[in-house]
Image (spheres, grey):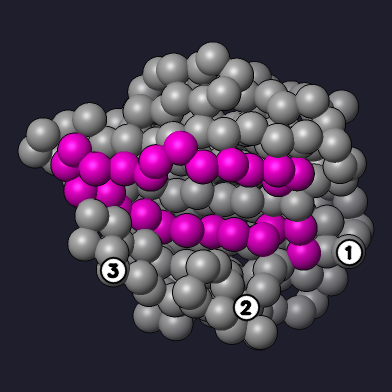
């Protein structure tokens, strides 16, 4: 087993006034050659968008983009004709494929939006763009793994499809509870991001916004020291 620990205060940070963004991996002005990716996971941004502000229309190509709101609602509009808000409890996926443009905006006049955006490198280039979003029940992640995202050819548990052999799980673990992870493929690794709380995993204690990458293992156990919320990404490592 190999581990890579990313403490919350080691992330890159950009303050644009309207946007405050923590970057787990190299992104925009934050460039760290030791933090380029974890396997196929290329980006994990923790963004706070101020009221009545947002990202103007911009392009994406050949990337699987997953957005997970933690607080507030983010309005989405894209070149495929999709226009709707994504709220806490929902997850949005975009397979950018051959190319698309989209914008993201905080329509609230008073409240910030906090969301995670993950980019996963695709297994196949030049696919037809795809957009989907779905609400996931809070009960489905209580002291267990809830599958949010899965490969297009291996969909399970109402998960959203992406063009990669990767999975994203969510779990709300109550204090003293444990969950077990088992890799879908021996070439995969786990990247565990603590949204809230404190956990023990791989002989390591992780706090809020800390993360750990674990590779070269087939199984893993996570214990919550206090009530914790986790995002777990399983991705091919090569």
Tag 2, which secondary structure? Answer: loop
Principal secondary structure, stretch drawn in magenta: strand
Which stretch is magenta? 39-63
Residue 64 x %, y %: 68, 42
**Which residue is located at x 91 percent, y 58 percent?**
186
Tag 3, which secondary structure? Answer: strand
**Which residue is located at x 87 percent, y 27 percent?**
153
Checking the image for residue 82, the label placed there is none
Residues 129 and 168: in front is 129
- Which callout, 2 or 1, points at the residue further toward the start of the chain? 2
Label 3, label 2: how many angstroms apart (C-alpha)? 20 Å
Q: Are marks 2 and 1 in contact (CB under 8 Å)?
A: no
Closer to the camera: disc 1 or disc 3? 3
**Residue 45 is inside the magenta segment:** yes
Read off the residue under disc 1: 238
**Which residue is located at x 26 percent, y 36 percent?**
106
Q: Are marks 3 and 2 in contact (CB under 8 Å)?
A: no
Label 2, label 1: how many angstroms apart (C-alpha)? 16 Å
Residue 67 x %, y %: 50, 40
Q: Is residue 92 visible?
A: yes
**Which residue is located at x 40 percent, y 18 percent?**
84
Residues 12 and 225: in front is 12
- Which callout, 1 or 3, points at the residue further toward the start of the chain? 3
- Which callout, 3 or 2, points at the residue further toward the start of the chain? 3
Q: Are marks 1 and 3 in contact (CB under 8 Å)?
A: no
Read off the residue under disc 3: 15
Read off the residue under disc 2: 35
- Asked where in the image residue 164 lies, by quadrant, the reply is top right
Neighbour tally class for label 1: few under 14, some 14-19, many 20 plus, Cα within 10 Å: few
Q: Quadrant of the N terminus?
A: bottom right
Residue 50 located left or right of residue 216: left
């Amino acid at each position: 087993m190999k581990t890579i620990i990313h403490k919350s205060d080691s992330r890159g940070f950009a303050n644009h006034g309207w946007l405050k963004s923590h970057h787990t991996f190299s992104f925009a002005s934050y460039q760290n050659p030791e933090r380029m990716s974890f396997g196929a996971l290329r980006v994990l941004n923790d963004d706070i968008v101020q009221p009545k502000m947002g990202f103007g229309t911009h392009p994406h190509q050949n990337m699987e983009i997953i957005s997970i709101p933690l607080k507030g609602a983010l309005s989405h509009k894209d070149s495929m004709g999709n226009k709707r808000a994504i709220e806490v409890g929902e997850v949005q996926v975009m397979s950018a494929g051959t190319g698309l443009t989209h914008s993201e905006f905080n329509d609230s006049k008073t409240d910030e939006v906090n969301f995670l955006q993950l980019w996963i490198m695709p297994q196949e280039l030049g696919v037809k763009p795809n957009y989907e979003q779905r609400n996931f029940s809070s009960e489905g992640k209580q002291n267990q793994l809830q599958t949010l995202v899965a490969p297009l050819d291996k969909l399970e548990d109402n998960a959203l499809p992406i063009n990669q052999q990767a999975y994203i799980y969510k779990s709300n673990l109550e204090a003293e509870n444990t969950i077990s992870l088992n890799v879908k493929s021996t070439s995969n690794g786990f990247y565990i991001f603590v949204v809230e709380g404190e956990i023990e995993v791989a002989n390591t204690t992780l706090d809020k916004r800390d993360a750990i990458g674990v590779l070269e293992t087939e199984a893993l156990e996570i214990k919550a020291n206090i009530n914790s919320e986790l995002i777990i990404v399983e991705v091919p490592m090569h």
